[in-house]
Amino acid sequence: AVLYCALRLVRDRRRPLSRTAAVVLGLPVLGLAVAAAGAVSPGAGLAGLGRYLQVFVLVPAAVLLLVRDRADVRLLAWSMAGLALWQGAVGVHQYVTGTGASYQGERIRAVGTFGPQDVMGMATVVSLGLVCAVGLALGRTPVRQRLFAAGCALVLLLPLALSFSRGAWIATAVTCAVQLLLAGVRRALAVGAAAVAAAVVLVGGFGVGTAMLQERVGSITQVADAPDQSVTDRYTMWAAAAGMWRERPLTGVGLKGFPEHRDAHASLALSSGSETDGAGAGYRRQPLLSPHNMYLLVLAEQGLIGLLALAGSWLALLVLGLRRLRAARRAHGAVPDCAFVACGLLVWQLTDFAYADIGGPSTVLTAVCFGLAAWWALGLRAQEVAER
């Protein structure tokens, strides 16, 4: 996509980005360059630099330049919703037939086609598809399309619940609440009541699954009062990341440096790895190589310079996107569906980054999400949609 976009720019001989877009999307490069220079090895620095540039700079810029109008945004949104429905169907089948990933000794965790080594993959896809469906249901589209999108969102609640992913649950709940509030308080209350009722109906008949879901939800708040090992590992790695930052506050330990410095900063409470099994794969013990918190990962590896540059770019996208959404409401009295989709995807990513970081095949969707957010916040054609 990036290569195709570059060839089009050369052929058309036009200025690729506005000054504001170039500054916002190019801001992370500063911290990445400094962190790459301080990596444990040149190879690790180049690999990390390429990965971050791909996810947060190049692909978002390509999406910004290649998306032409609202029809393209809808195409991407429906594609994500369709992918989520497919992965969700596979995940529900895994739960029903007991062929999913292992969870508390039973192979019931829905992971879709991602396998037990990437248990967050299906949860990410389903969550993003649900956010897109909610955005499409709230926009100015024909009633039939809005009803279909709302139905897709309700259906996706089931595989999301069966993913047993606490971070995805929290990010999706926060994002959908923000989308509904942006659409209006009255609509937010009505849709929220309907969603709660649907969740009760979907979850109510699962028997042992209900008890496991309740236990999983309850574990979110169990930080000090008998937390499970996964919670203990997560907070231990968060403390290790904070220790790395305190050691090198400005530049961090370098890209790809967290695994190398983890044991020197982690306490004895950290386990040797997470256990995975089921979903077509055998038993494996995976090492814990990241803090599962994007902000702390950036802080540890890139320091304050990298965090301010990267998070500053994300914050600018959010502020500019919400400002354009507000302008569209003033101009038309309603908000287009592409605004709900773009802002929703960005809010989901920024919320989920408190419980996860980049990695795995689903990261390509992360780059597309930032690209759609950039199109709405910075694109000239999106400005025409907001003002027209």
Image (cartoon, helix red, strand yellow):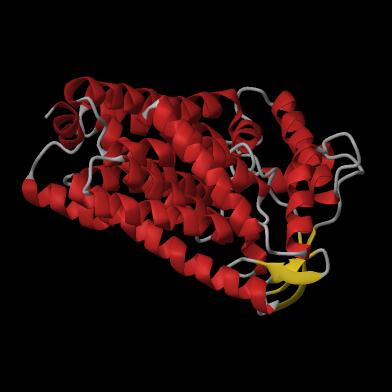
Residue sitting at x 86%, y 43%? 227
Q: Is residue 13 visible?
A: yes
Can residue 350 be seen here? The reply is: no
Front residue of this view, candidates 27 and 60: 60
Q: Nearer the viewer, residue 277 or 153?
A: 153
Whether 387 is drawn above or below 342: the answer is above
Q: Quadrant of the N terminus?
A: bottom left
Which residue is farthest left? 12
In the rendered view, tell whether residue 92 sits above or below residue 81. below
207 lies left or right of 124: right
Q: Position of residue 207 (x, y in %)?
A: 75, 64
Percent x, y for residue 383?
18, 30
Q: Nearer the viewer, residue 333 or 294?
A: 333
Q: Position of residue 154 (x, y in %)?
A: 48, 54
Q: Is residue 168 left or right of residue 151?
A: right
Q: Is residue 250 above or below residue 95?
A: above
Left or right: 375 with respect to 309?
left
Where the C terminus falls, by quadrant?
A: top left
Residue drawn at (27%, 47%), measured in percent from left and top? 62
Q: How many marks?
A: 0
Going 44% across and 25% down the picture, which residue do you hit?
315
Q: Nearer the viewer, residue 203 or 225?
A: 203
Q: Position of residue 307 (x, y in %)?
A: 55, 28
